[in-house]
Amino acid sequence: MDIMLARQVASFVGALLILVAYVGHQMNWMDARKAGYNILNAVGSAILAYIAFHPFQIGFIVLEVTWTIISIYALMRVRIN
C-alpha cells in the first residue's frame, strides 16, 4: 500500500473514531463519563496527532495532543472512581 494512501486511511479512521464518540454522545447513545467514549476519543486523537507530526503542523499537533491527554485523563478519572 502506498504510504500516502496509508496516511489517508489512518487519518480517516482517527477522525471516524472521534466522530462516532461525538455523535454517540449527542444522540444520548454514549455517556461522556464512560470508558468507551473516552477510549474512542483517545485513540482517534492519538492517531491524528501522530499524522500531524509528518509533516509538522503545529496547530493540529496542539489540538490533537491536548485532546488525547484530556481523553486519557477522563478515562483514568473514570477508572479511579
Image (cartoon, grey):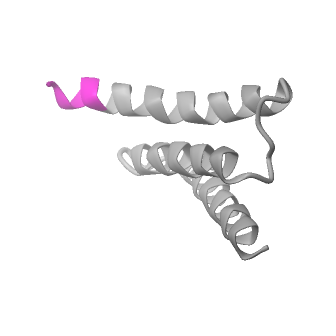
- Between residue 13 and residue 31, name the one nearer to us: 31
**Percent position (x, y) of residue 30?**
76, 36
Q: Which residues are magenta?
A: 1-6
**Percent position (x, y) of residue 66?**
66, 59
* Residue 70 vertical position relative to residue 47 in the rendered view, above or below: below
Q: Residue 65's image quarter?
A: bottom right
Q: Residue furthest left?
A: 1
Identify the residue at horizontal 56%, vertical 46% (top origin).
45
Can residue 12 be seen at all in this image of the molecule? yes
Can residue 63 be seen at all in this image of the molecule? no
Q: Main secondary structure of the magenta part?
A: helix
**Percent position (x, y) of residue 72?**
63, 63
- The N terminus lies in quadrant: top left
Identify the residue at horizontal 55%, vertical 27% (top origin).
16
- Between residue 2 and residue 36, name the one nearer to us: 36
Report the number of numbered marks: 0
* Residue 23 vertical position relative to residue 54 in the rendered view, above or below: above
Identify the residue at horizontal 16%, vertical 25% (top origin).
2
**Percent position (x, y) of residue 60?**
58, 45
- The C terminus lies in quadrant: bottom right
* Residue 24 is covered by the magenta coloring: no
* Residue 12 vertical position relative to residue 66 in the rendered view, above or below: above
Q: Residue 23's image quarter?
A: top right
Is 11 left or right of 78, judged from the image as shown? Answer: left
